[in-house]
Image: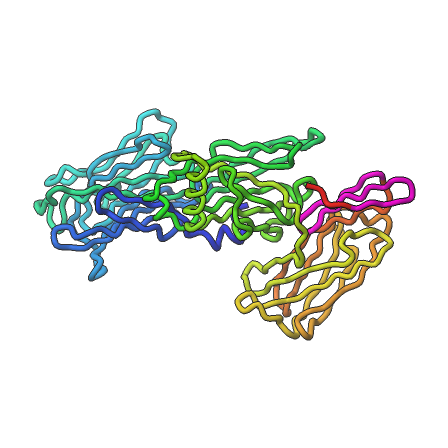
């Protein structure tokens, strides 16, 4: 689940802030860079890091704090830090650390013990924890067991020499994000279980709910809406996962809201090709969007919100073409079809164009394989060459070929690049049938020999 396209593209996500004159700037998921003012005649850069950035990944957990001279890019020698680390408002540790090479490397050993301890050796001059060749610094106890925001408060107490004490040290703050992956079991309108997943690249989601009557998903996450915090948040990124077979919610366009305020269309992205079995809907909220949302909430009389309440609901707009991009982001595929409602025994014309994702221009002489599948079985395949960048295919579905359908474009330009689209073929007859289309559900109501079609919600 974690290997989604935008999960990779937007891996550089962090929330940072500052106390007093210390400024910090997020440079990547799992770490944060603090650009400080001058300390005893030096301008230094402090990096805070937690590894791995996904706790389910293989690898030893570590907390690393390092400092370099911003001018020479050399490690600061013989530095003493006072480091406090918090998670979900709870203090994990607060202590002094001495680093001859500017790097404090804390090995994390999670245990079920109730007590949190630091172990290792201490520097004789400073009394601070000190990593040696034979003895690492260890953090032991029920720590770093879940993702979300990890809050650092750091003071530089000495620099260059243990005796070179920093007068009136200032506190610098950084918030490092560790990815969280949470699952929720909800019921559809028929009482069937549906597994939703939320992957957060910001903080841990505190609640989730799906309302089958309104066909809307809701979830909530802590968020500091202060201007100081927003000014250091490049982006907030959340992923909503659910099965592709969940037809009620499987529509290619959605409306997203934060605290009841509708987001721009560009903030919601549908991803059908990063997972074979799941659809992924991305919330991508930029810093400008956060500022707008703060102002909109203030105008609505909400002065000090504490959370982000996300709403994801189906859209009522049909928009062609449907767009997908290959995983390496080189080729964009635009797909449309006519007629809008796909039914058996009636010819459907699929029109598609291959484009350069950087320029938007059609890619001439693009070879491809177009495959139509139902229930994982191939029902149609065509190999072709889009000489002018676009092509079309006529196909008539059989009476038995209804329901969820996948359209894949593979071997693009003779490579392993591919994309995938999901559509629904509706039965020819029936009292009430639903067609899942690019951004709406179309209802076909049969009364006697007459058929009435209309968009709903």
Q: Measured along the vertical axis of the image, is residue 335 above or below residue 154? A: below
The x, y position of residue 281, in whole percent, is 57, 46
Q: Please tell me which residue is depicted at 43% across the width and 49% down the height of the picture.
A: 235
Q: Measured along the vertical axis of the image, is residue 352 above or below residue 225? A: below
Q: Is 51 on the left-hand or right-hand side of 211?
A: left
Secondary structure mostly seen in magenta is: strand
Q: Which residues are magenta?
A: 431-453
Magenta stretch holds residue 450: yes
Residue nearer the viewer, 178 or 246 = 246
Magenta stretch holds residue 86: no
The x, y position of residue 213, in whole percent, is 66, 32
The x, y position of residue 182, in whole percent, is 51, 36
Q: Please tell me which residue is depicted at 41% across the width and 52% down the height of the picture.
A: 12
Q: Quadrant of the N terminus?
A: top right
Q: Residue furthest right?
A: 449
Residue nearer the viewer, 321 or 403 = 321
Q: Please tell me which residue is depicted at 87% across the width and 44% down the height of the picture.
A: 429
Q: Quadrant of residue 150?
A: top left
Q: Quadrant of residue 93?
A: top left
Q: Quadrant of the C terminus?
A: top right
The x, y position of residue 219, in whole percent, is 52, 35
Q: Is 434 on the left-hand or right-hand side of 25?
A: right
Residue nearer the viewer, 130 or 2 = 2
Q: Measured along the vertical axis of the image, is residue 83 above or below residue 371? A: above
Q: Residue furthest left?
A: 163
Q: How is the image coloured?
A: rainbow
Q: Is 164 on the left-hand or right-hand side of 100?
A: left
Q: Please tell me which residue is depicted at 65% across the width and 65% down the height of the picture.
A: 411
Q: Residue furthest top?
A: 114
Q: How many marks?
A: 0
């Amino acid at each position: 689940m974690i290997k989604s396209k935008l999960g990779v593209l937007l891996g550089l996500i962090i929330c940072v802030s500052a106390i007093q004159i210390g400024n910090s700037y997020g440079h990547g998921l799992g770490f944060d860079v603090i650009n400080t003012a001058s300390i005893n005649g030096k301008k230094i850069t402090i990096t805070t890091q937690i590894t791995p950035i996904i706790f389910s990944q293989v690898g030893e957990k570590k907390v690393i704090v390092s400092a370099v001279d911003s001018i020479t890019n050399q490690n600061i020698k013989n530095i003493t830090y006072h480091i406090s680390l918090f998670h979900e408002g709870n203090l994990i540790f607060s202590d002094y650390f001495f680093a001859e090479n500017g790097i404090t490397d804390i090995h994390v050993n999670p245990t079920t013990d109730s007590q949190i301890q630091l172990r290792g050796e201490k520097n004789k001059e400073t009394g601070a924890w000190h990593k040696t060749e034979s003895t690492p610094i260890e953090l032991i106890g029920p720590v770093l067991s879940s993702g979300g925001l990890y809050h650092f408060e750091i003071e530089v107490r000495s620099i260059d020499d243990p005796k070179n004490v920093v007068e009136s040290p200032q506190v610098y703050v950084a918030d490092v994000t560790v990815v969280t992956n949470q699952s929720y079991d909800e019921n559809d309108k028929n009482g069937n279980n549906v597994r939703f997943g939320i992957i957060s690249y910001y903080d841990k989601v505190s609640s989730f709910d799906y309302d089958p009557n309104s066909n809307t998903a809701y979830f909530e996450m802590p968020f500091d809406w202060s201007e100081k915090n927003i000014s250091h948040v490049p982006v907030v990124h959340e992923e909503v996962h659910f099965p592709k077979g969940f037809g009620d919610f499987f529509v290619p366009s959605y409306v997203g809201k934060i605290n009841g305020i509708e987001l721009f269309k560009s903030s919601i992205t549908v991803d059908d090709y990063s997972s074979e079995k799941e659809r992924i809907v991305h919330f991508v909220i930029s810093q400008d969007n956060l500022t707008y949302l703060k102002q909109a909430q203030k105008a609505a009389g909400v002065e000090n919100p504490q959370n982000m309440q996300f709403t994801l609901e189906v859209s009522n707009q049909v928009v062609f073409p449907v767009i997908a991009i290959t995983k390496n982001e080189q080729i964009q595929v635009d797909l449309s079809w006519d007629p809008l409602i796909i039914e058996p025994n009636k010819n459907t014309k699929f029109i598609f164009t291959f484009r350069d994702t950087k320029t938007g221009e059609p890619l001439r002489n693009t070879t491809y394989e177009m495959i139509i599948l139902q229930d994982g079985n191939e029902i149609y395949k065509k190999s072709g060459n889009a000489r002018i960048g676009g092509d079309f295919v006529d196909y008539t579905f059989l009476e038995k070929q209804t329901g969820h359908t996948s359209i894949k474009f593979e071997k693009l330009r003779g490579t392993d690049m591919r994309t995938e689209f999901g559509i629904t073929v509706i039965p020819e007859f029936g009292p009430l049938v639903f067609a899942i289309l690019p951004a709406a559900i179309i209802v076909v109501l049969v009364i006697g020999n007459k058929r009435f079609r209309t968009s709903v919600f």
